[in-house]
Amino acid sequence: MTLAEAVLLGVVQGLTEFLPVSSSGHLVIMQHFLGFQEAPLTFDILVHLGTVLAVIAAFWTEIMNIIRRPTQRLVVMILVASVPTGLIGIFFKNIFEGFFVSLTVVAIGLLVTGILIWLAEYLSFGYKTVREMTIVDALFIGTIQGVAITPGISRSGSTIAAGLFTGLDRELAAQFSFLLSIPAILGAALLECRHLIGGQIEVDLLPLIIGPLVAAITGFMATKIVINLVKKGRLSIFSYYCWIVALLILVQQIFFNGR
């Protein structure tokens, strides 16, 4: 992997992990149309850890409050929501991984993401605070996050939409989505680390440093953008992006025999 590729992948991962456009979907698109090879496992794990650092930096105050008061309700809700996410990731991982070879699945996923975001923006009636949030709400959001393993379905977009559908306040829906990403990303990285045992690092040291750093910086920027748009009720602008990309993919698949 070259340094330029590490930077580009870091930018794409950092932005699309948190902007509601699906990082996995964009990875499939890049591999298909730009000829990008799948990132080495070591790099992939580190670049995802870079996005975790972005969330920690963006929500430093909230995370410090959680550490000081580990029994508070927000922590319980995050733990509850993480259960269905983890179960889906463990038991259905192989099924979802099979979707990563299909651009059609990516297109359908992007269409679904756009619809979820659009509906959530225009049908949401958010008022619930953390105290009013229920276990059912948390389980629903966590289940949606698990399903978002599907390439094309945005983790951030679908979980924010799920939060809005359950009646969460706009700011809380965004905050909960990002905080929920921490155990999800760390858990996925931990599962992948088992493949590194006894292996060799497949990438030069510099890309391993620069790629995750770029992902952390761009990821931090993306979180701020999304939070601002959610507060203003304008997250649906990404719906149009998802729909346009999805339609372009479907046209390519139908008329140019792409696979």
Image (spheres, rainbow, N blue to C red):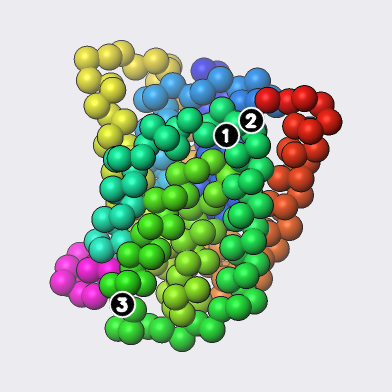
Q: Which residue is mark 1?
A: 27
Quick check: can you spot residue 123?
yes
- At mark 2, the secondary structure is helix
x, y percent for residue 195: 28, 23
Amino acid carrying label 2: it is Met
Label for residue 253?
A: none
- Quadrant housing residue 179: bottom left
Q: Which residue is mark 3?
A: 134
1 or 3: mark nearer the eye: 3
Tell me the distance, in whole angstroms, between the alpha carbons under discs 1 and 3. Answer: 35 Å
Tell me the distance, in whole angstroms, between the alpha carbons under discs 2 and 3. Answer: 39 Å
Few, some or many residues within 10 Å of mark 2 (<14, 14–19, 20+): some
x, y percent for residue 22: 56, 47
2 or 3: mark nearer the eye: 3
Q: Which residue is mark 2?
A: 30
Q: Earlier in the sequence, mark 1 or mark 3?
A: 1
Q: Residue at x 53, y 32 (%)?
A: 100
Q: Residue at x 50, y 82 (%)?
A: 126
Residue 70 colored in magenta in the image: yes
User: With 186 as the anchor, is 249 left or right in this view?
Assistant: right
x, y percent for residue 214: 51, 39
User: With 139 as the anchor, is 232 left or right in this view?
Assistant: right
Badge 1 vs badge 2, beta-carbon distance below 8 Å: yes
The residue range painted magenta reads: 67-77
